Image: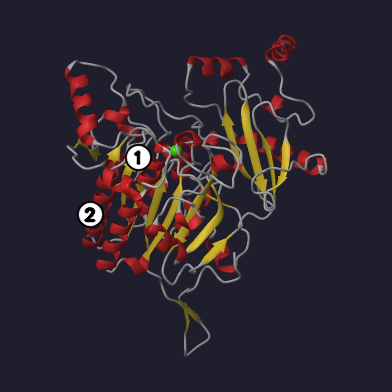
Amino acid sequence: MKMKSALCGLTMILSAFGCSAQVKKTPKPNILVILCDDLGYADVGFNNSPDIITPELDKLAKAGTIMTSAYVAHPFCGPSRAALMTGRYPHQIGAPYNLSDNGRVTDLGVPVNEIYMSNMLQGAGYYTSIVGKWHLGDNPQFRPNKRGFDEFFGFLGGGHRYFPNQYQPIYEKQKSAGMYPINDYLKPLMHNNEEVSETEYVTDALSREAVRIVTESKKKNKPFFMYLSYNAPHVPLEAKEEDLKVFANIKDKDRRTYAAMVYAVDRGVGEIVKRLKENGQYENTLIVFFSDNGGNFDHGANNFPLKGTKGDTFEGGFRVPMFFHWPNKIAAGVHFDHPVSALDLYPTFAHLANTNPPKGKVLNGKNIWNDLASNTSPHKDEMIYSLRYREGYCDVAARKEDWKIVRMGNEPWQLFNITKDLGEHKDLSGQFPDRLKEMVAETKEWTKTHIAPLWVYSQKDAEYWESGRLPGYDDTFEVDKLRMGPLEYKEMMEKRK
Ligand code: CA
């Protein structure tokens, strides 16, 4: 970050007639979280995309502070979103796997005793809404209206088709044939608990509803908290003709479609900003923009210069584009290079809403507001983690200031100076073996806070957990050996008996 305060104006007014300081109560800001789904690090203009233009997002980013080292708590959708809502690593709440999209009714979801940021802000007097993708449980007790959101418009599953005139006929046909389950991607959008008949391209529908709710919040004379959770540019890659035309120069069809989908989000953000300005809400609205995980390079995304893709614990999996925008409160034209985490949003929003996190609430992030002002690292000497369970093993990464350790697949542990070597090309573990060991040991210690998952993907995963092959931390955190093969593992388990 260039040396300039990211926080411009606190409103402390010293009394002219005495020594006592009088703190002028700042009105609670509106808080607008705009989340994209699987958006790559380099897929926005403000992060130097070579081929995607995002003029509306860029205007906000450049009038705000761009976080260059922003991490999410997990390299794919559901767990990342569970972490955002709860302020906790998904491994601590039993939610490190995605919930299924197959449409089957289950009794699974993020436990109801976890108090979401929406609950907190609702309690602090906010009008709370979610527009878009939920993915945190579709049984009634897990739905947005039961989890601190006054209003919900969108869909409960992990993704959705984009053109109603294409998905609705398929849905109707399957429904009338008595098919069960019907995939979440085909189901009608919902307004609170009612299915609605939608005609617009889904990204446009979500933007339209966001604009509507912004205005309705103003009429309620309350600050708003909106979680605008676009499913774009997550697959299926489906874009409008008018947006595709903007990117006619992109040869690759997937990339062209993906670019057009991002552009549709950008158009929508432009409409929302326009309405905020018309309503006189713009000056008092904090906008936080980011992606729930890294881009998927099999589906048109670009994470350059980061290594890896969605799902990885290389940077490309969980380091995401992010900015904060708030006129006269967040500095303009600034890059903040210290690591921050999506887990920091819960406590930071509590601070801005003049409230406290619920009593006894465990939070893994911290209020970063003062660090933005002073350009200091909110996580000095602290680790930021990413851990993903694969079939029978796990991938892990941890970052502390300039340093990052990572273990992916059957590769040994690696150590990078991630500030100098953003692309994770030069493994320094041979040069700094003690640093590597210390960081691995600290990460292993962190895993003691984990609990068993409340759901997994498959029977195979269930067997891995049953047998002890997952989480398999003893194996994972063994620095000097490669991971065990199936035979070695079998031997180890025999010896344990
Ligand atoms: Ca995602």
The correct choice, above or below, for 370 with respect to 134 in the image is below
Side of 96 where 327 appears, left or right: left
Q: Amino acid at mark 1?
A: Lys
Answer with mark 2 or mark 1, whichever residue precedes in sequence: 1
Numbered badge on residue 133:
1
Q: Amino acid at mark 2?
A: Arg
Side of 183 where 75 appears, left or right: right
Numbered badge on residue 154:
none
In depth, the one of 79 and 52 nearer the eye is 52
Q: Looking at the picture, how far across and down is residue 420, in whole percent?
A: 70, 53
Q: How busy is the neighbourhood of tag 2: few (under 14 within 10 Å), some, or many (20 plus)?
A: few
User: Which residue matches tag 2?
Assistant: 212
In depth, the one of 450 and 301 nearer the eye is 301
Residue at (53% x, 57% y) in the render? 67
Q: Looking at the picture, how far across and down is residue 130, in whole percent?
A: 32, 46
Classify residue 394 by image quadrant.
Answer: top right
